[in-house]
Image (cartoon, rainbow, N blue to C red):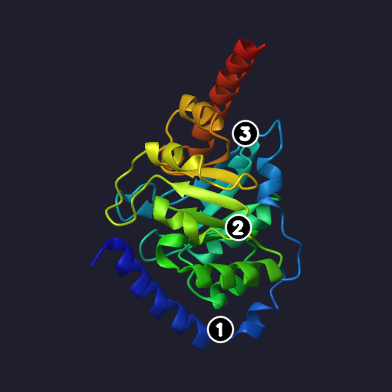
Amino acid sequence: MTILETIIEKKRKEVAFAQETIPLKKLERSIFFNSPCVSLKQYLNRPQGSGIIAEFKRKSPSKGVINAYAEVESTTINYMQAGASGLSVLTDQDFFGGSNDDLTVARKFNFCPILRKDFIIHDYQIVEAKSIGADVILLIAAVLNSEDIKQLTQTAHDLGLEVMLELHEEKELEKVGPNNSLIGINNRNLKDFKVDFNKSLDMAKQLPEHAVKVAESGIQTPEQVDYLKTYGFKGFLMGETFMKSTDPGKKCREFIQALNQVDAKTLSHVD
């Protein structure tokens, strides 16, 4: 059994338990449930924005513990003050050390768009995402068929949430529907968690023109971000690069400052 299969098997049990213990009506009474969502697509399309989606992640199946001591409140605030265009918060507990509370804390202290990073397989999780303060959910094409993606996307849109559809292989391009206008390409193979940075470049030209493109995983330098922009990418989801530092917010600020310098050089060459 692959890591991904193990995660999904556990997630099915987790969702079933949550449905039994926390009814939908209780989720719908959340103070966040009727609040308007902040558009990640709009933030990524801002001409002066960094495009960086800074992620809060304590651990991963491939790396183990990345940062056990970082606090959600201070880290996410510092990410936004550093110039990030959005936040991503892991809410999976067993494999990534996250929780729904992590996202709610980030929501209380930030007005930017927040992506709930988890393995969404059921409508219940989408209602849950809205109730904890998320603006965007992640749908992973590798674990969903085309009909599932269409239906879950519609559920999210009905609640005012945006959807980022995550692709890993070219064959998953056929799962992209007309309502999927925010698309991430993950350079990490979810079967063995190895990173292939060239994946974003190989698939970018095949994405719909209307899509806001996000590159995920394996991004370590401002030069890589600048290069990805030439392929039409507007978003760059980064977690480990920041979180492995003792001060993720400071690392994010230094990265974005360096990125601004690289962008300035690129513009001067164009002029």
| Residue 198 percent across, percent down from the top left | 38, 36
Depth check, mark 3 against mark 2: the one in front is 2
Tag of residue 180: 2
Examine the image and state in which quarter residue 47 appears: top right
First along the sequence among labels 2 and 1: 1
* Residue matched to label 3: 50
Which kind of residue does numbered mark 2 sit on? Answer: Asn
Residue at 67%, 34% in the rendered image: 49
Tag of residue 211: none
In the picture, measured across the screen, residue 60 lies left or right of residue 90, that is left
| Residue 239 percent across, percent down from the top left | 46, 44
Q: Residue 39 or 21: which is nearer the viewer?
A: 39
Which kind of residue does numbered mark 3 sit on? Answer: Ser
SS for callout 3: loop
Q: CA distance from mark 2 to mark 1?
A: 29 Å
Query: CB under 8 Å between callouts 3 and 2?
Result: no
* Residue matched to label 1: 22
Could you tell me if residue 58 is visible in this image? no
Query: CB under 8 Å between callouts 3 and 1?
Result: no
